[in-house]
Image (cartoon, rainbow, N blue to C red):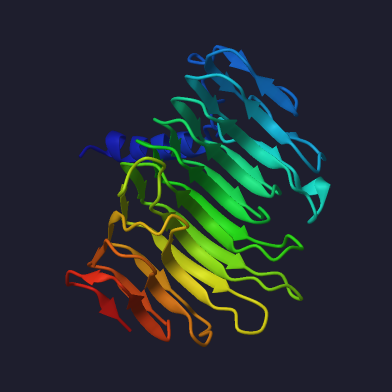
């Protein structure tokens, strides 16, 4: 290398270091057909509804975003949908749809609601890439919603409502062909003075008119379970069933951690039949798995 090149190299590096850095480019709104600029909001036309700024509400009942038609995508573009100002007694939902088809909720930061995201009935829903924190009872609920997927979400610090309901990061009750995959549930706590069980992920098998329903629950991470009240326990995963029917559930490749041991808590609790468990890593629970689970191997209990 010539002397000229040796002198030029440091000069080039210095120039690069002097180039100003800029903030990350703004989100693209090219796919948005409508915008939600304030809440509460009712969605009554199909399309992609986007946030382009943080929005919040202090309503203590009802819904911040109420979806009343099919084929709707809510894309928050990583902005916040907030309900913390309503306080711990709030019964409001952040995003809700009842009996709708093909609802997608993505890229939302939802905090401070009784239910963060609540999809009841219908089918074909997708909940992905959201961050939920400090919701009071359940982070994400997909109930009686067949052919639905809940994946790649982060659900933090659920709990705090002054009632006796079970706290859960993700709740999937009913519906057939449901997938719950690659989510992080960290921190599910009961409320002191109340009788609160806590569960990372709940699956219910029953759906009207069918004897069995299927679900795959794979690749999730569950930690930070903190029940309160006399006799209360924590379950990393449990299946529950008010219809007394067995399901067809695959619970595989999940990581369940309990850092502070609580007596009688169970990593995987199979209350009804039809739950195949394999290749799960279970740490810190007094009992790794219990009940009517089908142990198909590869489960490691520490």
Work out whether 286 lies above or below 151: below
Quadrant of the image occupied by residue 60: top right
Q: Residue at x 39, y 42 (%)?
A: 175
Q: Nearer the viewer, residue 69 or 286?
A: 69
Q: Nearer the viewer, residue 291 or 153?
A: 291
Compared across the picture, whether 29 is left or right of 52 comes to left
Compared across the picture, whether 68 is left or right of 88 comes to left
Where, quadrant-wise, is the C terminus in this rendering?
bottom left
Residue 156 in sight: yes
Compared across the picture, whether 301 is left or right of 261 comes to left
Compared across the picture, whether 89 is left or right of 268 comes to right
Residue 54 in sight: no
Q: Position of residue 113 (x, y in %)?
A: 70, 47
Work out whether 195 lies above or below 188: below
Q: Position of residue 237 (x, y in %)?
A: 42, 65
Number of numbered tags placed on the structure image: 0
Q: Residue at x 60, y 64 (%)?
A: 166
Quadrant of the image occupied by residue 233: bottom right
Q: Residue at x 34, y 42 (%)?
A: 176
Where, quadrant-wise, is the N terminus in this rendering?
top left
Q: Position of residue 299 (x, y in %)?
A: 24, 74
Q: Residue at x 27, y 61 (%)?
A: 274
């Amino acid at each position: 290398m010539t002397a000229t090149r040796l002198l030029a190299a440091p000069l080039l590096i210095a120039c690069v270091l002097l180039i100003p850095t800029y903030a990350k480019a703004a989100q693209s709104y090219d796919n948005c057909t409508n915008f939600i600029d304030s809440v509460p909001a009712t969605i009554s036309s199909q399309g992609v509804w986007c946030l382009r700024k943080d929005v919040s509400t202090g309503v203590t009942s009802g819904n911040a975003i109420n979806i009343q038609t099919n084929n709707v995508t809510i894309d928050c573009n990583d902005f916040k949908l907030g309900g913390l100002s309503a306080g711990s007694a709030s019964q409001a939902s952040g995003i809700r749809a009842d009996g709708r088809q093909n609802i997608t909720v993505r890229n939302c930061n939802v905090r401070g609601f009784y239910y963060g995201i609540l999809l009841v009935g219908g089918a074909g829903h997708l909940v992905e890439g959201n961050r939920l924190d400090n919701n009071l009872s359940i982070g994400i609920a997909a109930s009686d919603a067949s052919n639905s997927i809940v994946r790649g979400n982060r659900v933090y610090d659920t709990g705090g409502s002054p009632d006796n309901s079970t706290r859960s990061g993700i709740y999937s009750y009913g519906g057939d062909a449901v997938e719950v995959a690659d989510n992080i549930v960290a921190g599910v706590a009961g409320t002191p003075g109340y009788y609160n069980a806590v569960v990372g992920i709940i699956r219910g098998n029953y759906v009207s008119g069918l004897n069995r329903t299927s679900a795959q629950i794979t690749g999730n991470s569950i930690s930070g379970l903190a029940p309160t009240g006399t006799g209360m326990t924590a379950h990393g995963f449990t299946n529950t069933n008010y219809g007394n029917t067995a399901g067809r559930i695959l619970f595989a490749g999940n990581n369940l951690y309990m850092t502070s041991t609580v007596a009688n808590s169970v990593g995987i609790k199979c209350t009804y039949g039809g739950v195949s468990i394999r290749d799960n890593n279970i740490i810190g629970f007094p009992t790794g798995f219990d009940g009517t689970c089908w142990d198909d191997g590869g489960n490691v209990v520490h």
